[in-house]
Image (cartoon, rainbow, N blue to C red):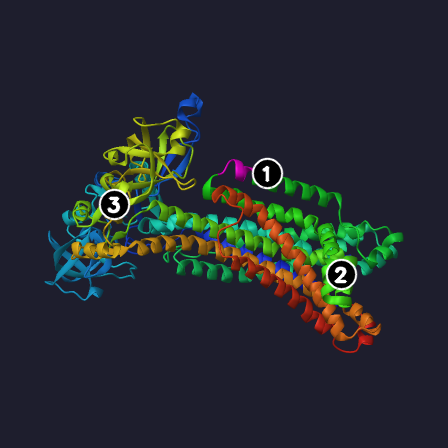
Amino acid sequence: MLRLAFRTLRLRKGGFIGTFIAVFFGALIVASCGGLMETGVRSNAEPQRLAAAPILVTGGQTFDLPKKDPETLEPDDKRKFEDARLPERVRLDSGLVSRLRSVPGVSDVVGEVSFPLAAGGKPALGHAWDSAALTPYALVAGAAPVAGEVVVESSSGAKPGDIVQVAARGKTESFRVAGVAGAPRSITQAAVFFSAADAARLSGHPGKADVIGVFTEPGADIEAVQAKVAEAATGANVLTGIDRGVAEFPEADTSGTNLIVIAAVSGGLSVMVAMFVVAGTLSLSTQQRSRELALMRAIGTTPRQLRRMVLGEALAVGLLATALAALLGPFLGEWLFGQLVENGVVPSVLRFYQGWLPAVVGAGAAMLAVFIAAFVAGRRAGKIRPTEALAEAAVTRRWLTPTRFIVAALSFGGGTALAIVTVAVMTGPIAASTAGPAVILWAIGVAMITPGVAKVMTAILQWPMRLLGGIDARLAVLNTRAGIVRAAGAVTPIMLAVGIATANIYLQTTQQELANQAFTEDVRADAVIGSAAGGLSPDLVQRIQGVPGVAGASEYVTSSVFLEKPYDSSDEGRPAIGLTASGAAATTDTKVTQGDLTALTGRTVALPEVVAKDFGRGIGDTLSLRLGDGAPVDVKVVAVTGQRPGFESLLLPADLLAPHTTAGLAPQMLVRAAPDVDPAVLTERLREATAGLPVTVGDRAALVAAHDKDQAVGAWVNYLLVGMIIAYTVISVANTLVMATVRRRREFGLQRLTGSTRAQVLRMAGFEGGLVALVGIVLGTVVSAGAIVPFCLVAADSLLPMGSPLIYLTIIGLAAALALAATLVPAWAATRGQAVDAATSGND
């Protein structure tokens, strides 16, 4: 039978093009997502400025988080921990430098500090001159710097003896250029070198090192030295080879983690959609050959032989399609990665990598879909009894099998369960984590019963269609009802496209709008002061509070903290905002239900009501926190606040939170105008008051725009990857409809011989395409509503999502246009030529 399968492929090339297209694009998308995941897992970033050191030591960015409350752990449970990732850079004690020098095989150890600055108005990174050996930079003119001097890069255009203005830590200082240095390799970020004392002062972390570079003795085994260094630097990360790039570009590691999540979600969704599309396409292809298969059963072909033939045909097409997808997958993956880099989702230093594993996974997923679809199609054809074969071949009527019923019941049950969990358990935007997967479950359930639902909807829509289209519309309805299983094969991909697109886009727009509302409602600032280099000076708040017309000013710091006591199992931490006590009430609209934000000084915290309730803490109680860089601190509750559900943040003093962030300073300050002062006047006064300082002053619109931009980056990722999946589904819609229409050439010829004109046949095909599109749009809308409505009830207290109605109108308009085009174009091609030739020809 396998031999017969290959001969069939040669004779029926057109009949298998649809299956090839579906398998190819499914494998292509999965393979490209696999490349993104592999890139995220590797998180490879080539070291640049630190490339000369074979071993780099950085602070450990994780800490042990108990899997359950430590007070309830049994003695033998003490090792039951999981890694929680710290969001801020963990620095090393400079004393580790001297200890590592005594490690056997180590020839030299260099500590490195790095801090943002602006030199001559251009952004750069500041370092101590000692760390120039890590690149290595070499002097091309002048000498090494001492206190009050700097060494600049040769590309800066400065020369020894020049005076440069350096802005760092919110202040501007003058430095003399002592020397000019050049590097043997390309460096992404410009560098300015200071004396060790100046670098320690300007970094804001004296006695600390960001990275420690370790040089080995000639001929030493790097892996052996690495192991010894790891023993001496307990708790630190010891990196060699390509992994060293993470020490220089820590954002690559974080972005890699995000990339894994993006690829996993998108790849998983792609696999499910691909299995659906491939199964539907292959099932339609098999149904269209029902007469041929029925004749084979009638002449004595056994069910097993028939199944082997169908399976062999499908696997042959699938192998060819997946092989081509495996070759082209890296190109699509690299293009997607380039788009992520271009839009600021991942840093440009992260290196794209796609090996053989993503190609294998993509091919495996596609072939699995082909195997399952072919097995089901072959099993159905093989179960036909020879005495019923020819009658069954004419019109396929039976569709609700026990398997379909069970899958539909399980899918609807799962979707209902997720909807209940979304409404009863989730709060705020986090409800999207359960609402999103519900789309697939509802789609699977509806797809299983599409023939039955389509039959009911066709019966309902037949009267308005007859009124609008007359005899042509009536024929279209009769054809659709007679071939309801065939029509359902075209309805399903339309339902998928409309359902997935509507649900995912409106979930994203609603989350984005809610985040913007929460931010604008909570922040009452009329102006914002931002840093031009490394953060704002801590004493700037008092200066701004003295500006005429200022009702209040507060530093604004964001980070994440971990609750250790009382125990909190969240491994992502809780959002934290740092504020200045004297200006917090004026610049934020946070509702205080207990206590007072003016008491937010020292080691204190203001808790959201939900956190206070969940952990049984109130005014005067103490909590043990771990800040963003891992530093432990005990804080006293001085206030309880009411915040929008899903956007709750712990409020801490800015001078407590900021030193434990990567920057070490507040990046911006919120300023509120007095009731009788025009915000525009206030903004101008702030510019005058900060003249000469390395800061920027903007109005409220600039503050909101900056927040919108941050939100737009996350939204863009969702739109890109979901759009790719939708594009694949759209291809399937066209593919399925073209297959279904081209096969009706003989039917159209017979209809023309009985008196219908070509125009009437095309009008009838158009009404059929419109009917199929309408049914698919309605079902897709229902599917999307199963996810959108529960989410919006929880997050927005509304049945409808936030976002322009034009989004939905565009989706259904494109679906309808695509369905009509994919029906009318092949129908126009199928009705060319003489009707008698078409009526006496085959369907291929």
Residue 706's x, y, as percent?
Answer: 34, 55
Q: Residue at x 81, y 49 (%)?
A: 383
Mark 3, secondary structure of its residue:
strand
**Which residue sits furthest right?**
387
Q: Quadrant of residue 475?
A: bottom right
The secondary element bearing badge 1 is classed as: helix
Residue where numbered disc 3 is placed: 555
- For marks 1 and 3, the one nearer the N-term is 1
Q: Camera-side residue: 480 or 2?
A: 480
Residue beneath the point at 46% across and 44% down = 429
For disc 2, the marked residue is: 477
564 sits left or right of 682 in the view: right
Sequence-wise, which precedes: disc 1 or disc 2?
1
Give amino acid for label 1. Ala
Q: Which residues are magenta?
A: 420-426
Quick check: 132 above or below 829? above
Q: Earlier in the sequence, mark 3 or mark 2?
A: 2
